[in-house]
Image (cartoon, grey):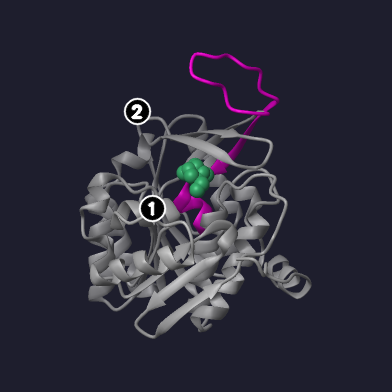
Amino acid sequence: MGPRVLVVGSINMDLIVQCGRLPDQGETIHGDALHTAPGGKGANQAVSCSRLGASTTVVGRVGDDHFGPRLRAGLSSEGINVESMRVDPNIASGVALILLEEDGRNRIIVLPGANARMGDDDSSAATALLPNADVVLMPLEVPLPVVKAVAAAARACGVRSVLDAAPVSPEAAAAGLPALVDIISPNQTEAEDLTGLPVHDLDSARAAARRLVEMGARDVVIKLGEQGSYWLGEHGEHHAPAFAVQPVDTTAAGDAFTGCLAVSLAEGMPMPDAMRRANAAGALACLKLGAQPSMPTAAAVEAFLRESSPRHDA
Ligand code: RIB
């Protein structure tokens, strides 16, 4: 049996507009295609964990609109336990508007909908599930008090907590999050927002990670995109170079990374190996359109690792 993962986080329907370029202010342009795909950082990470073989449970909320049942059924069809997911009446499900450029880069606007209604009931539900979890994963797309309460409960019962620090609001940056969790994993801009330091290369990532450790973090894993990932923690540091791919859609590459990192560590893998595997999962997620559709299986990650070498220039 794989590790047991609890995900407390957001569930969205992604509306993806493929366009050759982004419009300038006040400009109207034609898009190329519209797609819908299930997303939301919490749900994406849950799908990532489940496809990697983890026994996965989600705590989150959708609305009672036409997206809600589709999102719930989609997660259930992935083998994810959705019994603690709530369908909230009289509110829309979370929706993300994603502008996807030809080079695979995106810009995302999230309308939180039911995700913003998460509260004490959800943190209590998550806390009750913690004794049956090896690791709890939380992104920041749900109200901060929920994240803080679950992180505190996880620490109290000795369950490893992983915070995907996305998206960082000023409120989240000021909330002392690094000290509340076992592993904090921001990307470059999130590391900048959390520390106030610029992050553009390995040296600046190391400086930001040191600052996060000074702020109370135990293990910091910074996602550096084409420069791979960098870890600084109680037991060492490591840079894992990225794998070069031609991206179709970079949406949720970070979710694939975080899900794979959490599962690999829970399986007992040392951090450097877990980072290499998570870089591979992130690279694979860039090769397909859509967030949840692009989360790789364990077999796909292993095949990619056998066939690919990391970049040498990063
Ligand atoms: O991390 C990617 C996700 O961010 C998308 O699926 C979108 O829903 C937003 O939450």
Q: Quadrant of residue 307?
A: bottom right
Q: Is residue 24 left or right of residue 17?
A: left
Marking on residue 301: none
Q: Which residues are magenta?
A: 20-46
Residue 15 shown left or right of residue 83 in the figure:
right
Q: CA distance from mark 1 to mark 2?
A: 33 Å
Disc with the residue nearer the chain's start (1 vs 2)? 2
Per the rendering, the mark at residue 190 is 1
Question: Does the Cβ of the disc 2 residue fall within 8 Å of ligand 1?
Answer: no
Instruction: Find out whether residue 286 is within the magenta segment.
Output: no
Q: x%, y% of residue 263? A: 52, 72
* Residue farthest toward the right in the current orientation of the protein: 307
* Residue at left offset 29%, top offset 67%: 211
Residue 145 in picture, x, y percent from top left = 22, 52
Residue at (31%, 75%) from the top-left corner? 218
Q: Is residue 180 visible?
A: no
Specify few, some or many for label 2: CA neighbours under 10 Å numbering under 14, 14-19, or 20 or more: few
